[in-house]
Image (cartoon, grey):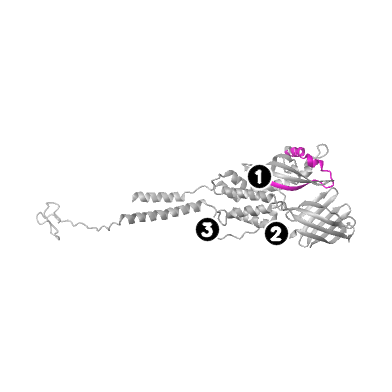
Amino acid sequence: MERCSLCGTPLETDETACSYCKHPVLKKIKTLDPPNPPSSSRRLLSFITVFVIGLGSVGTWYGLTQTESTHTTLAPPVQASPIADWSDEMSAYNQTYSSEDPPASYDVLKFVRQYTKTVPETATYSKTTDTLETFSAIQFATLETFHSEVAALQTIQAASDSPIPPRPHTVDFERFVSNGASFQIKTVETYQLTRSAGQHLVTYDVRYNVRLHTDHLQITHIVRTEVKA
Amino acid sequence: MKQFVIILFCVLLAGCTEVPPSGVQSELELGQYTQAVDQSTRQDTMHDPAKLMVQLETALASYHFKEVVKIARTIDQLALAQDNPIRLRAKSLQLSAEAMLVQLKQVEGTYQIERSTLDTGLKERSFPATGQIDVSFAKRDGLVATIDYQDFGMVEAPRNDTESIRFEPDLSARLALSEGLVSYVFNRSGFTLTFEGPGGKLVYQLKKI
């Protein structure tokens, strides 16, 4: 039962003022509180909300950070790479590069492979009679490297004046790493020499250092070791 | 309730934080696989694919086509998106290497002389020639061919020897002689062997049997 807020007299249900002190009865605005959901449902609701938003956030983060698109489920049609892309049809020596257009790793391999074709000619170099500029190898390498090659190619040099000059046979790339601005390449190179007794192979373990010099690739160091059969 | 809203807001903010693009990614897009390997750690998702691409390109530069196909298949098994540049590049090189292997298989075999001509520069005439040539390519060094001459050449001086020739990917080879040049060319119609020297040009056109 309600009572008067001033004098405490019990009030009838619909009275507008206290029957004793005439103090007006202020009607309470009765707000019906919705029944509280059971705590387990509330927890479930919170969990679903967090899960959905979390999932959305992870999705957004992934989309922003991953440049490769995963939305494509079908593989695009792939064409075979043209032979010109990986063969020696185009001269690697003439290629120029910049910071916007740096050499791809395969460009470096191609550069070294094309250099090996100049090796038999390098072996014919004579300090007394030849002009250095006429040798193709000098376009690929530093002067010191050229001279170190001339010194290391004695076996090929000995066969240089045979009717069939020495020629590259196989170039196997064994190791290829980058170290910041330079590249280290290890190859096993075989050159074919033709002597009166027939064809003969000479093999070298070779280590190259290649760097980007201004706008082109340049071999800065070669360690060539003949592999004795 | 208030705390819950704050936590949700933080989660949303964390989701929208932009991570700077990886340097490795740009290296990969430029085909600089060695640099990508150099600049990444083993934990990076693209470290292993980049390393495999270096191996693939190394095999390709050595003209080891079977190895190229094998490595490309390994890359294809990696958990990369279908349109990932590494996967596409590996696939493209795989197709090229497979086409090369098919071509090498096709040109292997025994050839006999169909036509033999001597061009002296003044006139061209045919001359009698004899014999066969057997061609086979090495298993590992795909472009290295063994050419076996069987009573081949001019009737008065046939040759019976074997030589090993490294071909270019277009299936041609040019070898310098002290006085001249020899060229070997495989084409659709067969195999052409040309000796160029001071006396003129000796051409053998051979047909596969």
The tag on residue B102 is 2
Please tell me how crowded label 2 is: few (under 14), some (14-19), or many (20+) other residues with Cα within 10 Å.
few
- Numbered disc 2: what chain? B
Asked whether, in this view, residue A191 is left or right of residue B126, the answer is left
Amino acid type of disc 1?
A: Arg
Asked if both marks, 2 and 1, belong to the same chain, the answer given is: no
Residue that mark 3 sits on: A71
Which one is nearer the viewer's eye here, B31 or B44?
B44
Question: Dots 2 and 1: beta carbons under 8 Å?
Answer: no
* Cα–Cα gap, marks 3 and 1: 36 Å
Residue that mark 1 sits on: A175
Please tell me how crowded label 3 is: few (under 14), some (14-19), or many (20+) other residues with Cα within 10 Å.
few
* Cα–Cα gap, marks 2 and 3: 35 Å
Amino acid type of disc 3?
A: His
Q: Is residue B36 above or below residue A38?
A: above
* Cα–Cα gap, marks 2 and 1: 28 Å
Please tell me how crowded label 1 is: few (under 14), some (14-19), or many (20+) other residues with Cα within 10 Å.
some
Splitting the image into 4 quarters, where does residue A27 fall? Answer: bottom left
Task: Measuring from the top left, give residue B201's x and y in whole percent.
Answer: 86, 56
* Disc 3, SS: loop
Question: Dots 3 and 1: beta carbons under 8 Å?
Answer: no
Asked whether, in this view, residue B180 is left or right of residue B87, the answer is right
Task: Measuring from the top left, give residue B191's x and y in whole percent.
Answer: 79, 59
What are the residue bounds of the magenta stretch?
A145-173
The tag on residue A134 is none
